[in-house]
Image: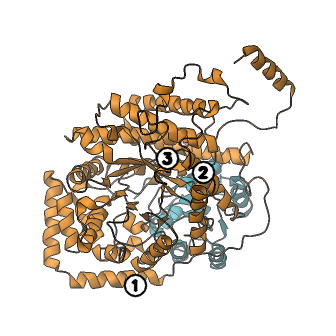
Chain colours: A cyan, B orange
Amino acid sequence: MRKIRVLIGKPGLDGHDRGAKVVAAALRDAGMEVIYTGLHQTCEAIVEAAIQEDVDVIGLSILSGAHMTIFPRVLKLLKERKANIPVIGGGIIPQDDVKKLEKMGVKKIFGPGTPTNEIVEWIKNNVGGKNSPGQSTKSKKSRKQK
Amino acid sequence: MSQSKKRQWEDKYKTCKERDFKFTTISGIPLKPLYTPDDLADFDYERDLGFPGEFPFTRGVQTTMYRGRLWTMRQFSGMGTPKDTNKRYKYLLKHGQTGLSVAFDFPTLYGRDSDDPFSHGEVGKCGVAVDTLRDMEIIFDGIPLDKISTSMTINPPAAMLLAMYIVVGEKQGVPAHMLTGTIQNDMLKEYQAQKTWIYPPEPSMRIITDILAFCSDHVPKWNTISISGYHIREAGATAVQELAFTLANGFTYVEYGIKAGLPVDKFAPRLSFFFNSHLDFFEEIAKFRAARRIWAREMREKYKAQDPRSWLMRFHTQTAGCTLTAQQPENNIIRTAFEALAAVLGGTQSLHTNSMDETYALPTEKAVKIALRTQQLIAYETGVANVIDPLGGSYFIEYLTNEMERRAYEYFEKINALGGVLPAIEKGFFQKEISRSAYEYQQAIERREKYHVGINIFEEEEKPDIEILKIPPEVEIEQIKNLKKVKKERNSTKVKEKLKDLRKAAENGENLMPRILECVRAYATLGEMCNTLKEVFGVYREPIIF
């Protein structure tokens, strides 16, 4: 079975990338293939990258308060593209919004203070690496912004 | 001190049991159980400390420090529409705040208008939206700009927001030379840590030196750059890295100012600094004291500044947002109080205290009032402001101050070896250092080598139940409506003309500030001005590192 492939995305204008990078490094050290989009990505670019890279899960980090706009948009774009990729997230997100987001289809929101191994475990338990040997030789890499 | 008594004590100590804990500062400086005169073997009072308000300013930048005037209590604030923000400012001033600090929303920070597609969902969310002069007029409505100083956290579009503030002043009858305040205008730390950029580093430095030149002639009481360690620290740096990188950036601005033909004493007195105050109490205090001493020495000896005002480092402090916990949020009040106390004992000139609810959203009125009251308690109840640099002379504090300084100079050598700050940014040096420290700190927390109450010790299961501020989506709709109205009412031919002049100035190297002021007066939008400069300067792309 190939390694679990994860796309970590920073959508919108938010520049707070500490959490995204720490999570990316932790997932990489846990043996996953991590694609980090870099900052200031559109929802379209993130969805396109996720499909192109054939990832098993998308993790979005949003600390700007725009989560109620960005998560629904990414979910909608994935649906339009018929891409069945689970979306998880983290950042500065109030409890009420966490409930709403999980209801609309975001699989899990990891708030501040979450140990990275909790995220690793969640992904391992909920997202299986697909069997696609043709792609298993891909090395870790970072995508440049478009 | 009797060496034999010391040895006796040390022998006795070795027979005792220590807690199972690695005793280091958060930056990883190993800590002995006790500090004595032996740790300050070549201590020289005049050389290392001196007197308050005198070289090398280790004990503070003013002669009287807080016995003359308390620090400025300045809460960073802004949300929703300009009207909402004006209301919050009046609330804070009513409760005893003594200075203003504007938080802009993300579109404004990136020089984008509220109706830009990239702004969708972000308008008014993490700060106030400003599209044109009209918004700034509303934000400062009824607030006399000759009586209050205003700090603006704004970087790539700093020149535009400063120009708007100047014009608001004009309209209130306050001329530019009387305005007091600060623009952050520190692009180097943007590339390193905070990541709000538009243009590549070189044109950004040109805009900054244009501002330095313009302000030294026309807005002489304005702090032209707030050289910021805050964001470097928030992005994950240690105290030592924050100290070293911030000072290295400061020296780079001085070098660019000199290179642009400005005499150092003409602009250096208006450079100010902005630091983080984190959890490790003594390490933070030592950091502040070391920062003042290094700046003074380098400004006098390396950059040959003659004016003592060029030697002294004035700084603002904000408690560390990254130390706040979503778990047991009320604990954040106490955490912030300790961090604020360190800033005061470190001699800060102004202070922002974070609110307990900020791991969820922008603060409610109640939360921000408690944060302000925290400062007032320190100032009026604890007595710590009654004696200058009360920790000065402590064996431990002086040792740690020296150690912070020594480690900062090690970083200066590394940065110099890479060719200076700008080449080091291009090579990703700072970005890698900061990412590494952020990851190491997270690992230390997860291995319980460092503690964070509510995170890895004294955890509780229950979900917190505190009031949260909501910014409704109607804010974006209203802001776009107001922007459309301004665009309809202004003279669009004049706007086009002024933007063309701005473009020409960008191309031929003349100072941009007078052109930007003309655009602002014609109600050109922030996006129009920034996009005009983009056409000439291009945009920055980051190297991706994690």
Distance of label 2 from label 3 (alpha carbons):
35 Å
The amino acid sitting under disc 2 is Leu
Q: Position of residue B164 (x, y in %)?
A: 28, 68
Marks 1 and 2: which is nearer the front? Answer: 2
Mark sitting on residue B341 = 2
Residue at which label 3 appears: B545
Q: Is residue A56 visible?
A: yes
Instruction: Indicate the secondary structure of the residue bearing disc 3.
Output: loop
Q: Residue at x 63, y 54 (%)?
A: B382
Instruction: Indicate the secondary structure of the residue bearing disc 1.
Output: helix
Distance of label 1 from label 2 (alpha carbons):
41 Å
Most foreground residue, B177 or B442: B177
Instruction: Indicate the secondary structure of the residue bearing disc 2.
Output: helix
Residue at which label 1 appears: B478
Both labels 2 and 3 in a single chain: yes
Please tell me which of labels 1 and 2 falls first in the chain: 2
- Mark 1 — on which chain does it sit? B
Most foreground residue, B112 or B44: B44
- Identify the image quadrant of residue B494: bottom left
Q: Is residue B263 above or below residue B70?
A: above
Most foreground residue, B448 or B158: B158
Both labels 1 and 2 in a single chain: yes
Mark sitting on residue B506 = none
Question: Can you say which quadrant of the picture contains the N terminus of chain B?
Answer: top right
Q: Position of residue B337 (x, y in %)?
A: 63, 56
- Image side of residue B156 versus residue B351, left or right: left
Q: Is residue A124 above or below residue B315?
A: below
